[in-house]
Image: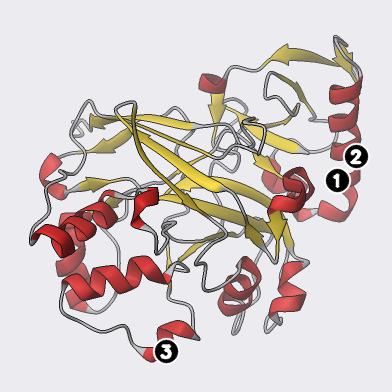
């Protein structure tokens, strides 16, 4: 099934079930008012939500389901599926990206990176909707997109194995994990990791259950290309299932090694990157690294105010699975 949240009903939005072609939706407040509420009682809510999804898909032009009006979906009216979450932990599961970045700096990848995931605690107090602008106060910060896959868990016990963690992955979506590249070096040098360099991320219009991906969801990886465009120009289509050193089950188990995870926890893959650079890139830092290794210096600029981006995954028939993240970069207004 496919789930989304409307920009209504408070900071956590209003949960809706969306049909497979992303054209129609229906509110399900009788089952759960928000996606967070649904995830906290997933064993009970998931079968009921799935039944609504089947009715929405099978009932043709039905005008109501369970007394709620079916309506045409307007992506601009959507918040992030989870407008805020208790936890978002992002990984760096694609080692070709890590290897290239370190090689450009003349550094080696530590051996531990190949057996132990690199992850950080990301911003989760608020997520941007799929059409909300990317906001920054200055272009000098080095505004960058990062096209990634994200999964959402139910309650995960502490110290689960990867095999056990796989059963706790309930939803899959896309995330634009926005980075301010020129702020990162100084922050990392302090030793505590990202803070100012990581503003709010944007999520795809819908999150889907793994069964919606069919055979493209194997070994807890999405085996489809991540397609990105900048200013309507093709930028990349790296394959999400290739060169992913750690599966989502590995990542979830890593996060839960010393603590349980609450229902609604998001775990990100990190920027999608392949050894084959002919497939383009999923972030500007990656493209700039390729240019540095090839030409001695980067030539692609970071994002400017007014630039647009699009992030999407389609199935083998070309149908959008999660809907597209489409954003414009805009200057944030100073308060007061």
Number of the label disc, if any, that sits on residue 48:
2
Look at mark 3 in the image and give the residue it sits on: 112
Number of the label disc, if any, that sits on residue 264:
none
Which residue appears at 69% of the width and 51% of the height?
216
How many labels were placed on the picture?
3
Which mark is nearer the camera, 2 or 3?
3
- Please rate how many residues cluster around mark 3, counting C-alpha atoms within 10 Å: few if below 14, some from 14 to 19, many from 20: few
Q: Quadrant of residue 309?
A: top left
Verify CB contact (< 8 Å) between mark 3 and mark 1: no
Which residue appears at 17% of the width and 56% of the height?
291
Which mark is nearer the camera, 3 or 1?
3
Verify CB contact (< 8 Å) between mark 2 and mark 1: yes
Tag 1 secondary structure: helix
Tag 2 secondary structure: helix
Which residue appears at 56% of the width and 54% of the height?
150
Of callouts 3 and 1, the N-terminal one: 1
Look at mark 1 in the image and give the residue it sits on: 45
Regarding residue 282, the answer to whether it shows in the image is no
């Amino acid at each position: 099934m496919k789930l989304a949240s409307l920009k209504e009903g408070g900071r956590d939005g209003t949960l809706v079930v969306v049909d497979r072609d992303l054209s129609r939706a229906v509110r399900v407040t009788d089952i759960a008012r928000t996606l967070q509420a649904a995830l906290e009682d997933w064993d009970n809510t998931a079968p009921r939500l799935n039944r609504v999804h089947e009715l929405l898909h099978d009932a043709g032009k039905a005008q109501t389901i369970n007394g709620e009006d079916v309506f045409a979906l307007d992506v601009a009216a959507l918040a992030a599926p989870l407008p805020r979450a208790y936890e978002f932990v992002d990984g760096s599961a694609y080692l070709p990206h890590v290897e290239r970045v370190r090689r450009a700096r003349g550094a080696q990848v530590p051996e531990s990176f190949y057996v132990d995931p690199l992850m950080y605690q990301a911003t989760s107090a608020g997520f941007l909707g799929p059409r909300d602008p990317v906001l920054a106060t200055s272009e000098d910060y080095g505004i960058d997109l990062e096209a990634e896959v994200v999964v959402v868990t139910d309650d995960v016990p502490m110290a689960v194995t990867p095999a056990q963690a796989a059963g706790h992955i309930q939803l899959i979506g896309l995330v634009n994990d926005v980075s301010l590249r020129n702020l990162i070096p100084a922050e990392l040098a302090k030793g505590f990791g990202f803070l100012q360099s990581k503003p709010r991320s944007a999520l795809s219009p819908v999150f889907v259950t793994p069964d919606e991906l069919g055979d493209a969801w194997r070994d807890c990886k999405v085996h489809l290309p991540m397609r990105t465009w900048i200013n309507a120009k093709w930028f990349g289509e790296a394959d999400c299932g290739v060169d992913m050193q750690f599966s989502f089950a590995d990542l979830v188990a890593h996060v839960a090694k010393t603590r349980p995870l609450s229902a609604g926890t998001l775990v990100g893959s990190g920027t999608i990157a392949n050894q084959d650079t002919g497939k383009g890139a999923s972030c500007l830092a990656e493209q700039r690294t390729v240019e540095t290794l090839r030409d001695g210096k980067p030539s692609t600029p970071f994002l400017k105010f007014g630039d647009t981006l699009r992030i999407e995954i389609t199935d083998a028939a070309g149908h959008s699975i999660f809907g597209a993240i489409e954003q414009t970069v805009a200057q944030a207004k100073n308060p007061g």
